[in-house]
Amino acid sequence: MDITQDFVDERFKTFVLDRFCENRGRIQTSDVEGIVSLQLANLRFSSLKGLEHFASLEELDCSFNHLTELDISKNANLTFLECNGNKLHVLDTGHNLKLKKLSCNNNEIYSIDLEANVQLEAVDCSFNRLRHLDVGRNPMITKLICSWNMISDLHVEQNPHLQELNCSYNSLFNLELKRNASLMYLDCGSNYLIEMNIKDGAGLVEIRCNNNHLKHLDVSQCPVLESLRCFQNHLTSLDLNHNPLLNELYCSENKLTELNISCNPMLKRLDYADNLIVEPDHTVKGMGTFRYDGSLCSYQTALLYKDKELSVRADVPAKADMKRLSPVIKKTWEQLDQLHEQAADLIAHTHPDEDVTELVLSELEFDKDATIRIGYDAGESPAGHLYIYAVFNRKHELSSQLVYETY
C-alpha cells in the first residue's frame, strides 16, 4: 500500500525514503511497519505525520525539532519516547500501554495524562506549563523529574519504587513522603513548602529543600543521609544526631540559634551563615582576640606586622574548631618572618621578571585542615585586582604551586 501522501513534512518524507525505501521514490506500508527504532533528533522536522504506519515502533527520539503536535496513538508497542525541546502543548500517551520511559522536557505542555501508562519507570516532564500531575496509577516509577512547572499538588505515596524525585521550581505547599522507602535523591527546592513530612527516609542520600518556607525539618528517619541543602527557609532548629554519614550541609539564611554537629564526623562542607548563631570570641595567646563573623562562618582579626595591618582569618565555623587550630596559628605567627621569606623567594623564582619587593603582604589564612595561605596584594591586572598566595601545610612545608585570585 502506497502511503507516501501521509508524510506531509518534506524532510521527514525524504528521511524515510532515503533510509527505508531503497530509493524507489514512494513509501509502502511494508517499508516501515517493521521498524522498531527511530532516531530523529535535531533534524528540523515540523511534523511527524506518517508515524502511524510504524506499527512495530518501540523507541522514538524526536527531540529538538519544531513539532507542535505528536500523534503516537497508533504506536502501541512504544516503550521509549523522547520528544524534548519541541513546541508541544499536549501529549497523549493513552494508547501506549507498554511505555516505560517518557522524556518530554522543554516543551509548552499544559496537560498530560499518565493513567494508562502503568508500566512507566522514568518520567521527565520538566520545563513545561503543567499545573497538575497525577502519578497515582504508575506504581513502577523509579525516576520522576517534573521541575520548572506550576504544579501545586503532588502525591507520590503510590510510587513505592521511586528512587529519584525532582519537583523543584513549582508551586507546592506540602509534600508527603510516607511510602517511599526506596527514595535516594530528593530535590523539592524553590517551592512554597510550609510542610514536608519524611516518614521513611531509610535510603535517602541527598535532600535539597532550599528556598522554601519550612519552619520544621525532621531528618531523623534518614540514617544514610550524606547531603542536606535547606538554606533559605525559616528553620529555628535542626537535629542532625541521626545522620552520621552527613558530609555536606548548607543551612544558611535560616533562624537557627545553635547547630550541633558533634554526631557528624564525616562533615566536610558546611555553610550556616546568616543565622542567629553567635560563636564566642577566641583569644590566641601572644596574638590577640579573634571575633566570629557569622556571614562568613569564620574567625577574624587584624594584627600589626612590621608596622602594617595584616588580616588574619581562620575558616572554621565554631569555637571548638578554633581551639583545635590555635597551636598552628600561634606557631605560624611566631615563624612568619621565615615563612614570608620562603614565599617571597618562590614568587621571585616563578616570576623572575617581576619586582617582588612591590608586593604587599596582606592576608594570613588558615583552613580547617590547618592549611596555611600567605596572601600578597599584587595590584591591578587586566583580569582585576590580583592576589598571589603561597600555600603551606600544617608542618610549614611550602607547596611549589602558587595560587592566583582576582577580585
Image (cartoon, grey):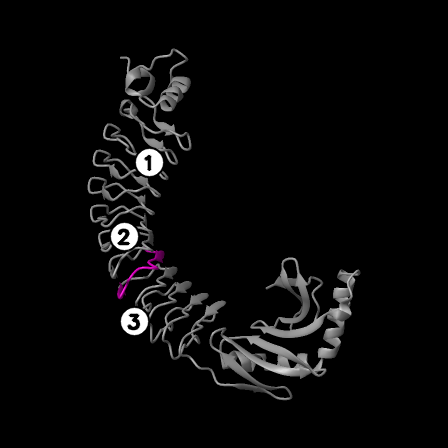
Which region of the structure is painted magenta? Answer: 183-197
Task: Specify the amino acid type for callout 1.
Answer: Phe
Could you say which quadrant of the image residue 211 lies in? bottom left
Q: Position of residue 143 (x, y in %)?
A: 33, 48
Residue on which the image places disc 3 = 215
Label 2: how many Cα within 10 Å (few below 14, some 14–19, many 20+): many
For marks 1 and 2, give the one nearer the viewer: 2
| Side (left or right) of 90 relative to 301 | left
What kind of element bears circle 2? Answer: loop
Q: Earlier in the sequence, mark 2 or mark 3?
A: 2
For marks 2 and 3, give the one nearer the viewer: 2
- Inspect this view and state whether residue 267 appears: no
- Main SS, magenta residues: loop
Q: Position of residue 117 (x, y in %)?
A: 23, 40
Q: Position of residue 130 (x, y in %)?
A: 26, 47
Q: Residue at x 35, y 43 (%)?
A: 106
- Inspect this view and state whether residue 43 appears: yes
- The quarter of the rendered structure image containing the N terminus is top left
Q: Position of residue 281 (x, y in %)?
A: 51, 85
Relative to 357, does residue 147 appear above or below in the rendering?
above
